[in-house]
Amino acid sequence: MGAALATMALKAIAYLLTGSVGLLSDALESLVNLAGALMALAMLTIASRPEDADHPHGHGKAEYFSSGVEGALILVAAAGIAFTAIQRLIHPRELQGLGVGLAVSVGASLINLVVALVLIRAGKRHESITLEANASHLLTDVWTSVGVIVALCAVVVTHWQWLDPLVAMLVAANILWTGGRIVQRSVVGLMDVAVGPSEQAGLHRVLESYRAEGTEYHAVRTRLAGSRRFVSFHVLVPGSWSVRQGHALLERIEADVRRVIPNVTLTTHLEPLEDPSSWDDQALDRSELRTLGAVPVSEPRPVTDPGPRPD
């Protein structure tokens, strides 16, 4: 938030000194940065709360609201920049004080670059879509500033005043693309998307390794909620096993799954191999297996003589 306030003030000063609509577009994007930072602070505070009676799976999805709002703000800023640039193309204006204005803009861009690099590192460490969205937006802001500075330098050399609003329109298009990508990622997260292909492949490798012990598995389901993963599956064992044997097996499987999928909440269900009703949920595997693509996954072996089904 401090960086957003500082860069917004610096870019506003640069605009007042030069009259460049490109620098004005830069200043407007910094205003969006501030709004996004405020939203991020609020949603990260909510997401960090522990589970409670109303939210037994935690509050991690609050992060998707933050990135969604920031993406929407970016889209609004892009529309405003494009409108201002079109007006300047229709009514051109002589630019002034470009030297000082450019120096101020460079200083603001360096602030954004440093903050973006810090946020990228923090976002990866904490697996936070909110921090990653903020970092992506700030990096876009940096490249926007670079484009504006190059355009203004070209205006100084060529005296073609129309280059300034033209670059502002290109900036608006770039911002529009970034905002759309952030909104799309937020929507996907709110729709309970499965964990990534590499983590799914690791999960199935673990489950496949236990088939040598005479067990089966199916009904594998995964989903993401912020940085948390939720995984559930059924494990089928011989009906003659004791409860202690089945529990010990699940403990081993869950420990192995946690080694390949970080920050995971596991839900497992034990079923007897010989009971036909144990296989009723086999169809749930189909949608999950499709997301694995080329990863080979063995189909569960059918029971040839399941015996009578209990009432």
Image (cartoon, grey):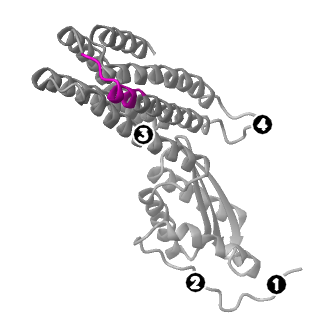
Q: Marks 4 and 1, how far apart in space?
A: 39 Å
In the rendered image, which residue does mark 1 sit on? 309
Q: Marks 1 and 2, how far apart in space?
A: 18 Å
Residue that protrudes farthest toward the right in the picture? 311
Please name the predominant secondary structure of the magenta segment in the image. Answer: helix
> 194 and 24: which one is in front?
24
In this rendering, is residue 166 above or below 263? above
Picture residue at 46% right of the left edge, 55% below the top: 196
Picture residue at 31% right of the left edge, 24% below the top: 22
Q: Which residues are magenta?
A: 84-94
Q: Is residue 206 left or right of residue 87?
A: right
In the rendered image, which residue does mark 2 sit on? 301
Q: Is residue 296 left or right of residue 281?
A: left
Quarter of the view holding residue 115: top left
Residue 18 x/y as whole percent: 27, 12
Give the amino acid type for the residue marked by disc 3 in the picture. Leu
In the rendered image, which residue does mark 4 sit on? 54
Sequence order check, earlier mark of 1 and 2: 2
SS for callout 1 = loop
Q: Residues within 10 Å of mark 3 (few under 14, many from 20)?
A: some
Q: Quadrant of the C terminus?
A: bottom right
Give the amino acid type for the residue marked by disc 1 in the picture. Arg
Residue 248 x/y as whole percent: 61, 59
